Amino acid sequence: MLRKLYFRPGFPIGKARRLSWIEKIFGRRNILVRTIPGFLFSCDQRDWLQRNLLCNRVHELEVTTLLKAKLGASDIFFDIGANAGYFSALALACGVSRVIAFEPDPDTCNVMRRQFAINDWDPSRWRIAQLGLSDREGYQDLIRGSDAGESGFGDWPYREVVGRLRVKVGSLNDFCCRYEIRPTVIKIDVEGWEFPVLNGADKILNAPETRLIIFEAEIIPTGQIKDDRLSAIFKKNGFTVTHIPRPSGTLKVTENFCAIREQS
């Protein structure tokens, strides 16, 4: 109801910042949205990604479109840095066999569980792994950002730090070995922590069933990936990397890329 009252077609995204007067009338509450891909999402307007869904009903249209075209019933989708679970929900809505959502923040994991519950998806099809991925096993400080999507490990110049939380970390190699599962499609969004994740996933990257990886990375002004180590890892394991352009055609400090395994 709140969405219908306020987020009418044609209103700019900036209107989301003016929700305070609605909250004074109705109180602060999550707003249930039917996304363009078709699944339900309970949006907390205090979070950027969820606020964006209130306005647009889709997150990162270019990535959403690519995944909808590429995912199939036989796929096992790994969502690394799942945040509130939008791409995990998208994969489940696309009918994939299994989704594993990796997210180290316990509060964010609870948000994801609610998203899956309101869509009534079979729990045998999804798992939330409350784990940070890296190239080693142990514990590390999760640096919480002012927005949940900015939280992560290591130094990230675009993060407004609001707190720290000690969390468990491990490698993707170890996780897949322990639970005897391997992905076919992976999405990685870890705010500058891409190299440790990939460095701890060499067995998975080298596995023939891993066919597609979508990842976000910082770029230089000309549009190339800033960290040369990322391109080297993908090339070593037989992937070709291409940029996924935004619908606007503009470049931001981080961009999405697609790594596809080369056909032999």
Image (spheres, rainbow, N blue to C red):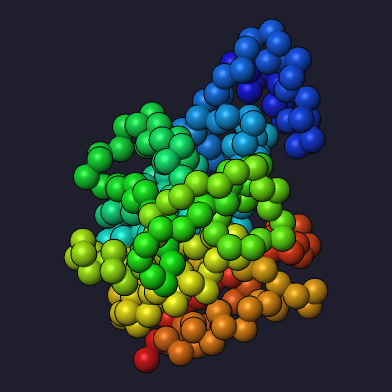
Question: x, y percentage for residue 252?
Answer: 75, 62
Q: What residue is rendered at 35% in x and 31% in y?
A: 117
Question: x, y percentage for residue 108?
Answer: 47, 40
Q: Quadrant of residue 199?
A: bottom left
Q: What residue is rendered at 50% in x and 88% in y?
A: 235
Relative depth, front residue between 62 and 207: 207
Q: Quadrant of residue 77?
A: bottom left
Answer with left or right where residue 22 lies relative to residue 65.
right
Question: x, y percentage for residue 122?
Answer: 25, 39
- Residue 15's place in the image compared with 232, above or below, is above
Task: Tell me the quadrant of the picture where the C terminus can be found.
Answer: bottom left
Q: What residue is rendered at 63% in x and 72% in y?
A: 243
Residue lying furthest top in this view? 25
- Residue 7's place in the image compared with 248, above or below, is above
Relative depth, front residue between 62 and 179: 179
Question: x, y percentage for residue 3?
Answer: 63, 23
Q: Quadrant of residue 152?
A: bottom right
Answer with left or right where residue 6 lies relative to residue 116.
right
Q: What residue is rendered at 31% in x and 60% in y?
A: 76
Relative depth, front residue between 108 and 122: 108
* Residue 58 seen in this snapshot: no
Answer with left or right where residue 134 lies relative to residue 6.
left
* Residue 156 seen in this snapshot: yes
Task: Tell me the quadrant of the picture where the N terminus can be found.
Answer: top right
